[in-house]
Image (spheres, rainbow, N blue to C red):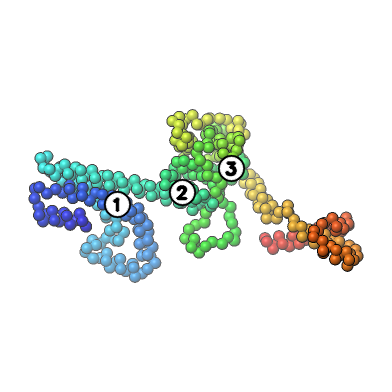
């Protein structure tokens, strides 16, 4: 409005000494402050308008009534909101035409050149600020997608470079055959595996609009820990494979992480060169090509032959299921009280006479109890005891299933 008022005053009181370029130079700093937030929140405002128009009939009717008015030019609210963004390049072109038709001896010609330069700087600043905002949004998307992602991934100087879908070929960083997603940032590498389906989880009602995390965090590795990038040659038994030789701070030796690329959008050569370049930038080295080493799959026992077979997928699924069952029904730590009660019940089932009241009183008064004082069950009663325990376990297992 300030620029509009000054231009109207300029036209009403026109004089050859008046300058159009000075008006835009006067408000160039205000444009830098005002436009970036407007541009960054435009997409969010657009989505909210469309959402409210669908959900609220009265709001939809209000927009249609005002759209028919002459002052709106039959344009929707979203189309009117984008006009201030489109106006900047239009004004720059208009000032450029004015400069062409301005005599060289006119003092306004130099100010018009400065005004055009200031508008270009404003548009450059808007684009740069929008790029930074989109980069931060990409990092937030990664945090929401990866369950257990460290909070320190969020940083103002960090940006997402590339995302690559792979399959683990070794025992690190997860089991062989696991689907692993690598997020390459400018200074670190986020490693996440595909999350297994969880049944019966409870979610907050506030998170209904956001889809559940599809990945599980494994490791956030600084690029400085990568010592070598291994390009594994293509053979009949090995396709699209590569490996990373890393040295974690807690390990005394190098650890080999081998993967097979499954995404076809990015060639393996381009991905490895990109990774080496950012590793070299992190450790302040100019020779990024020296970080890559071409090797044969036999040197590191890397094989991708059976990764896509049905039998291999079934065996990996059985392995995962057995691990879950082992964790769910672990008998490594049996409570002492349960063991004492089990042995006592087996002892009474043999028909032995109970201890005398004097001995029982002494045992109650003792500060410590020992299983050695309890007579061990006979070998005859042990099978029946374990039969009862297994029967109870089978009933509880059936209930859980």
Residue, disc 2:
154
Give the Cα distance between marks 3 and 2: 23 Å
Residue bearing the label numbered 3? 173
Rate crowding at label 2 as few (under 14), some (14 to 19) or many (20 or more) other CA atoms within 10 Å: some
Q: What element carries label 2?
A: loop
Which quadrant of the figure contains the N terminus?
bottom left
Residue 236 can be seen, yes or no: no
Residue at image location 52% in from the left, 56% down from the top? 212
Q: What element carries label 1?
A: helix
Earlier in the chain: of badge 2 and badge 1, it is 1
**Quarter holding residue 174:** top right
The alpha-carbon separation of the residues under discs 1 and 3 comes to 46 Å
Give residue 344's position: percent from left, percent from top. Answer: 83, 61
- The residue lying at 52 percent from left, 30 percent from top is 293
Q: Can residue 69 be seen in this view?
A: yes
**What element does badge 3 sit on?**
loop
Residue farthest to the bottom, as pictured: 58
Cα separation, mark 2 vs mark 1, equals 25 Å
> Residue 252 placed where, x, y %?
61, 35
Residue corresponding to mark 1: 33
Task: Looking at the image, tell me whether mark 1 or mark 3 is earlier in sequence order.
Answer: 1
Q: Nearer the viewer, mark 3 or mark 2?
A: 2
Q: Is residue 100 left or right of residue 228?
A: left
Q: Residue at x 12, y 54 (%)?
A: 11
In the rendered image, the quadrant that contains the C terminus is bottom right
């Amino acid at each position: 409005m300030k620029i509009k008022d000054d231009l109207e005053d300029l036209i009403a009181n026109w004089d050859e000494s008046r300058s159009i370029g000075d008006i835009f130079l006067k408000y160039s700093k205000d444009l830098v402050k005002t436009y970036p937030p407007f541009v960054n929140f435009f997409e969010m405002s657009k989505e909210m308008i469309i959402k409210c128009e669908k959900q609220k009939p009265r709001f939809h009717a209000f927009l249609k009534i005002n759209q028919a008015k002459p002052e709106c030019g039959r344009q929707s609210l979203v189309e009117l909101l984008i006009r201030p963004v489109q106006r900047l390049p239009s004004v720059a072109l208009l000032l450029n035409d004015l400069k062409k038709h301005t005599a060289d001896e006119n003092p306004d010609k130099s100010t018009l050149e400065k005004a055009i330069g200031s508008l270009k700087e404003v548009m450059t600043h808007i684009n740069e600020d929008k790029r930074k905002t989109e980069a931060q949004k990409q990092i937030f998307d990664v945090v929401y997608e990866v369950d257990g992602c460290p909070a320190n991934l969020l940083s103002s100087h960090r940006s997402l470079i590339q995302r690559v879908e792979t399959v683990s070929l070794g025992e690190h960083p997860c089991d062989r055959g696991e689907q692993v997603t690598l997020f390459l940032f400018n200074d670190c590498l986020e490693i996440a595996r595909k999350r297994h389906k969880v049944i019966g989880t409870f979610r907050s009602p506030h998170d209904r609009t956001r889809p559940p995390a599809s990945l599980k965090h494994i490791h956030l590795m600084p690029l400085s820990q990568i010592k070598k990038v291994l390009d594994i040659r293509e053979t009949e038994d090995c396709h699209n494979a590569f490996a990373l030789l890393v040295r974690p701070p807690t390990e005394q030796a190098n650890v080999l992480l081998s993967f097979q690329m499954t995404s076809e959008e990015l060639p393996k050569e381009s991905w490895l060169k990109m990774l080496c370049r950012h590793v070299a930038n992190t450790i302040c080295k100019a020779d990024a090509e020296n970080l890559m080493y071409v090797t044969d799959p036999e040197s590191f026992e890397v094989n991708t032959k059976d990764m896509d077979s049905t039998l291999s997928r079934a065996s990996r699924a059985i392995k995962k299921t057995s691990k879950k069952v082992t964790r769910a029904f672990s008998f490594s730590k049996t409570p002492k009280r349960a063991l004492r009660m089990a042995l006592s019940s087996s002892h009474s089932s043999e028909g032995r006479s109970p201890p005398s009241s004097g001995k029982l009183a002494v045992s109650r008064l003792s500060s410590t109890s020992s299983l050695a004082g309890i007579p061990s069950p006979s070998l005859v009663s042990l099978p029946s005891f374990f039969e009862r325990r297994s029967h109870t376990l089978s009933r509880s297992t059936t209930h859980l299933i």
